[in-house]
Image (cartoon, rainbow, N blue to C red):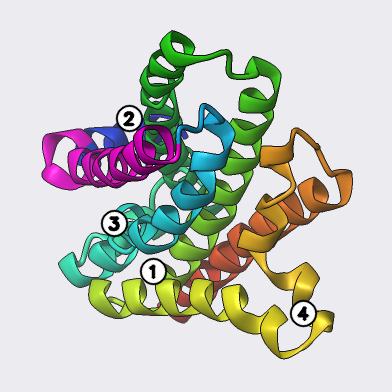
């Protein structure tokens, strides 16, 4: 599994993918940071992540759309399916590598926290809770993105499916309160207030595991067909 993680990380950093993801997020985050801090005189670091969650919705496919779809397109998927590593370890390895990129991005946001410390006294505990919620949201997005990538060999289609699903869950609560608990981004809203909601945390983790299991099943079925 560590070999897969290493290979994926090399792919992210030997190509523009990892830099584009981190760069786009930080550019957009900087814009919202400027608006909140300098125009509205706010020193609440955690509230900027409301905008960060929105950014994540649209750039997650940069990390995930190529993860398995590219393997199929290039014909290297057969090597994965017949490798000594189990398919489960391959999927988890790809998932962990993408999660590491998000963690690096989160670490970079501490620069903004340092700037806020110069202007005011942001609450470090609330900031850490917000970063935890953001990571939970990110791993949920990543797991679904990898699942979408496993069902097609076209990276663009995988990206469209991923963003389409995220937007759908985003707006579902507007149609009925029944769907409130199915909105990944809405569940994140409690974390910037410093609350670690156990139910939402379990939902994020369960959703992530479910998507990874479905990805393994999809690849196992493809292996059996071959």
- The residue positioned farthest toward the left in the image shown: 15
Mark 3 falls on what kind of element?
helix
Q: How far apart are the two marked residues, 1 and 3, measured between alpha carbons?
A: 11 Å
Q: How far apart are the two marked residues, 1 and 4, measured between alpha carbons?
A: 25 Å
**Residue receiving disc 2:** 6
Instruction: Say whether disc 1 or disc 2 marks the residue closer to the N-terminus.
Output: 2
Q: Nearer the viewer, residue 170 or 99?
A: 170
Q: How far apart are the two marked residues, 3 and 4, measured between alpha carbons?
A: 27 Å
Which is more foreground, mark 3 or mark 2?
3
Q: Let me know if residue 200 appears in the view.
A: yes
Mark 2 neighbour class, 10 Å CA radius: few under 14, some 14 to 19, many 20 or more: some
Give the label on residue 74, or none: none
Which is more foreground, mark 2 or mark 4?
4
Asked if residue 92 is among those painted magenta in the image, a careful observer would answer no
215 is higher (above) or lower (below) than 38: below
Residues at badges 2 and 4 in contact (C-beta under 8 Å)? no
Residue 19: x percent and y percent? 19, 38
Q: Is the magenta stretch mostly helix, strand or loop?
A: helix
**Residue receiving disc 1:** 149
Mark 4 neighbour class, 10 Å CA radius: few under 14, some 14 to 19, many 20 or more: some
In this rendering, position of residue 69 left or right of residue 49: left
Mark 4 falls on what kind of element?
helix
Mark 2 falls on what kind of element?
helix
Instruction: Say whether disc 1 or disc 3 marks the residue closer to the N-terminus.
Output: 3
**Residue receiving disc 3:** 62
Numbered range of the magenta stretch: 13-40
**Residue receiving disc 4:** 179
Q: Let me know if residue 154 appears in the view.
A: no
Mark 1 falls on what kind of element?
helix
Which is more foreground, mark 1 or mark 2?
1
Mark 1 neighbour class, 10 Å CA radius: few under 14, some 14 to 19, many 20 or more: many
């Amino acid at each position: 599994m560590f070999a897969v993680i290493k290979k994926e990380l090399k792919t992210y950093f030997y190509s523009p993918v990892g830099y584009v993801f981190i760069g786009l997020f930080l550019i957009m985050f900087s814009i919202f940071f400027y608006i909140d801090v300098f125009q509205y005189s706010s020193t609440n670091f955690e509230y900027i992540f409301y905008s960060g969650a929105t950014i994540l919705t649209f750039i997650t496919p940069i990390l995930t759309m190529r993860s398995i779809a590219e393997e199929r397109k290039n014909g290297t998927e057969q090597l994965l399916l017949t490798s000594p590593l189990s398919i489960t370890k391959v999927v988890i390895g790809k998932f962990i590598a993408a999660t590491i990129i998000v963690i690096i991005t989160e670490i970079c946001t501490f620069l903004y926290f340092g700037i806020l410390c110069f202007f005011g006294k942001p609450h470090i505990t609330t900031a850490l809770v917000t970063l935890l919620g953001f990571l939970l949201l990110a791993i949920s997005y990543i797991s679904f993105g990898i699942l979408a990538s496993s069902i097609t060999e076209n990276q663009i289609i995988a990206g469209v499916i991923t963003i389409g699903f995220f937007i759908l869950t985003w707006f579902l609560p507007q149609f009925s309160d029944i769907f409130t608990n199915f909105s990944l981004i809405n569940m994140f809203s409690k974390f910037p207030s410093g609350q670690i909601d156990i139910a939402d945390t379990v939902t994020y983790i369960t959703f992530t595991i479910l998507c990874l299991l479905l990805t393994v099943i999809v690849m196992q079925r493809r292996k059996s067909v071959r």
